[in-house]
Structures are given as C-alpha cells and as structure tokens.
Amino acid sequence: MALVEPHGKTAFVLAGGGTKGAFEAGAISYLVEEEGVVPDVITATSAGAVCAAVLAQARTHEELVARSRELHEDLLAMTRADLLFGKQPWVAELDGTLFGRAIDHWVVERTRPPVPGGAPVPGRADAPSEGAGPQRRPLLRLVVQAAQVVRALPSLGRARRQMRGRTGSLLTLDPLAEHLRHGGRGIAPVDPALIARPGLDLRLAVVALGAGTLRYVTEDGTIVGADAVTPVPGAAGGPIDLIDGVVASASVPMLFPARPLAGDAYVDGGVVENVPVAAASALGATRIFAILAVPLDPPPDDHDYAHASAPAVFLRAVGAISFAERQRSSLSPSLPAGTELTVIDPLVDVVGPFDVARGLMLVNMDYGWMRAADVCADVGAATRRRAAEATDAIVVARTQAWHLEEEMWSRGGATSGDLAALSRSKRIVRDALSERKDLGLPTPHDAARWWSGYEVHEGTRPTALPPDLFDDGH
C-alpha cells in the first residue's frame, strides 16, 4: 500500500440526507469555529452538495467562518417548503383534496422517523387522518371517505390532463435553484465565480442515467468520471452551470425530475455514492472528515410491514435499509496508509429527509455540533463514550420534548401529565449537559435554554401554557 505524502490535503465529505443535512451544518460549525479546520477538498452528495456549494465560496478561515454561519441561516430559511420544492402541475391540481393531502402526508409525515424512545409520531399512519377521529365507526368512516373521493373527482380529471409528459416526478427543485442563483427570503445567493477560484477542489456526486454511471461535477462545472479526476470526453464533460450540478446532485429519483446536463439526464449521486470518501482520497486528501446526515443503522420500526402499503415497504426497504448499506460501503474504500478518516455521524434520527420543522432542524444542528465535539475531543476512549452517551440522551430528550410540545401547541393547552412528562425530559437534558461539562466537553453557547424553556415551534405559545415551567437547575 502506498504511503501518503506528508502534509496532505484536508477534506470535508458531506453526505446526502435531505433536510437531515442540518446535522452536517452543526458539525461543520464546530470543526470550523472551534477546531479551525479549513478544507482543501470538499466532496458531497445531495443535501451535502447544497452545503458544499455555500462553503466552497470560501478560501480563508475567516471566509469559511462567515460561510458556515451563512449556511446555518440558509438552512433555517429553507424551513419554508415553498423555498425548496415546487409541485408538478398534475400534483398541484390535487391540492386540498384527499389525494393531495395523501401525497403531502407521504412526502413529509411518513418519511419522518419514529420519535426516539418509542413515542408515536403524530400523523404517522399509512394514510392521513381526515376529520374522522378514531372513535368513528367503520361504516361512517367509509361514507366520509367516499364523499371525499367524489369531491376530488373534478381535480382528478384536471390532474390527468396535466400529467401528459410530466409524470416523471411529484415535485421539482426549481424554487431551490432559483434561490441558490439569486438569493432572497433569507437565503444567500451562491456565486459560482467564487467557487471556481484556485485553492479548493470540489466534487459533487451525480448519476448519469443515460451513461449508467457515477460522475462528479467540479468547482468549474467540468464533469469528471467515477474516479473523480478524469474529465468525461467530448461535450458530455461540460462545462455546465454549477447550480444545475448542485440541483442534479439533490434530485432524488421519482420525487424530483432528472436534471439535463451536457447531453445526459442526471439524478441524486446518493443512488450510488452517498458518502464520497474515495473521491476525497483521489484528490490527495489525507485528513478526511466524513460528516453523515443519516444514521448508519436505521432505527427500529415496529410498523406492520407484512400488511403495509407498497410505498411504506419501498421507503423502509430502499429508503432506509438499502441506503444504510450504501453508506457503510462508502465509508470502507481502500485508502493509502496513513490516511486519517474521522467519521461524524448521528445515532439518533431526529428529522425526516423532507421535513421542514424549524424546531427539529435546530435540535439536529445542535446535535451535529456536539457530536463533532465528542469525536474531536482529546480524551480517552471511556470519557469519549460517556460524552457521546450524554449527547444522545440530550438529543433524544429534546426530540421527545419537541413532539410533546407540538401536541400542546396544536391543542392550545396541556394536561398535568403532559407537563410532568415535559419536565422529565428537561431534567434529562439538564443533567446530561452537566455531565458533559464535568467531562470537559464543550456545548453550544445557548445550551441552557434547552432545558429551561420550550423548543422552537410555529406560532406563539398558547396562553394556556405556563411561560415558566422550570427551575434554575439547582
């Protein structure tokens, strides 16, 4: 095995995972601001490609700190679904109908992971609830559903006419492309000219459907082969518009249309390579930080898949289990001796890949920050393990608290049992933060509010909920 050259390059490898990429933003913030890491190489896939495009505009540490903070704000602005996704015309025709609500449910709610600890996810049934509560008798439910179908028939006819030639996806990423190009509504524009400057190698993983192979888009819009180095010959090698490359890397098949680039149609690179570690090594990186957005092991799911719908089985088998296997494979390439590979990955699944709940994304960002601190800490193995366990306990408790509070927000109040359960979660957060401090591990500057107040939710706190639930921690 060849030895690496001394003083090799540093790389960020940013995996895909949709809005789970909030975890990556938190980890990047820690690495850049607390450890002073400045990458020479960034390789990325899907959601990681969006993060990479923002970061790749920087060359100095000061610029990178500013871009890391910009990325944080960009992702929080993207909690407005309309800033990310547009609906295909045939899907838009179904808005407000039973079928339209079912599509929305499957894209957002059904892909949201189970609440850690076994609590149910509100609305995570195979079909969205529709007015009729669980107390309704089967015959009455059937009558209600039949009425909804009848009301939706005119929309179905219009949707069918709109489907001609446009059935390749449910949604589009045109709004995301527009905001990456021009900015607005809290999202800063990405400048391809800054990315193309010398001083940083960028590789965005994409899959060419026609050629049937993995390729990468580089910092100047060139398309290179699966080795991440060799330009694709002829016109198929570009150059292309870099923003189109970012969007192609994030174009999950079936959900978003394939992106035409240089005579071929491209989709999400995560279909083949979700964690492009090998590409970073091919570019000379010897210190590699691989930051994942999705846990390597999918969380247990007690859904009855023997009697589940086809989409539910597909999501579990292909979207979770097969995806996890691809991630593990991506983290095990043959690397030159002396290469330092540091993996920063979540164990707790906080948010869904198309979830735009701002509160959950903030929890996931804080999770990424703490997990990076755990991994990078100069401590013994036993201390690192205890710190990581405390981090996971914090994230589990905060996620449970968010879901419970969300129920309170929707009901406009809470029972004494709700408040007692919420108080238990906050005490777990407080005690785990205290343990991390005793172990010498840092926490984000605003960590005290995690246990002393509510998580972030849409709208104002219902007046029936007490403004001050918790003591001062003593």
Image: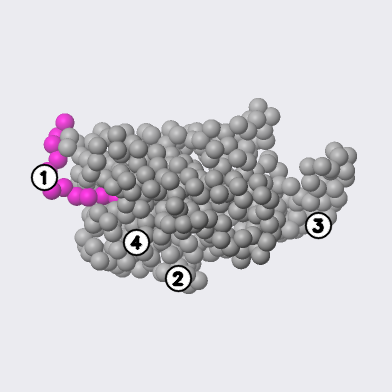
Point out the tag, 1 or 2, that comes first from the N-terminus. Answer: 1
Mark 3 to mark 4: distance in Å? 48 Å
Callout 1 secondary element: loop
- Which labelled disc corresponds to residue 68? 4
- Which labelled disc corresponds to residue 6? 1
Mark 1 to mark 2: distance in Å? 41 Å
Q: In the image, what residue occupies the spot 38% across and 65% down? A: 70
Of badges 2 and 4, nearer the viewer stands: 4
- Which labelled disc corresponds to residue 183? 2
Give amino acid for label 1. Pro
Q: In the image, what residue occupies the spot 25% across and 66% down? A: 62
Of badges 4 and 1, nearer the viewer stands: 4
Question: Would you say the residues marked 4 and 1 are in contact, meaning their CB atoms lie under 8 Å apart?
Answer: no
Nearest the eye: 343 or 146:
343
Mark 2 to mark 4: distance in Å? 16 Å
Q: Position of residue 456 (x, y in %)?
A: 53, 59
Mark 1 Cα within 10 Å, few/some/many (few <14, many 20+)?
Answer: few
Q: Which residues are magenta?
A: 1-17
Point out the tag, 2 or 4, that comes first from the N-terminus. Answer: 4
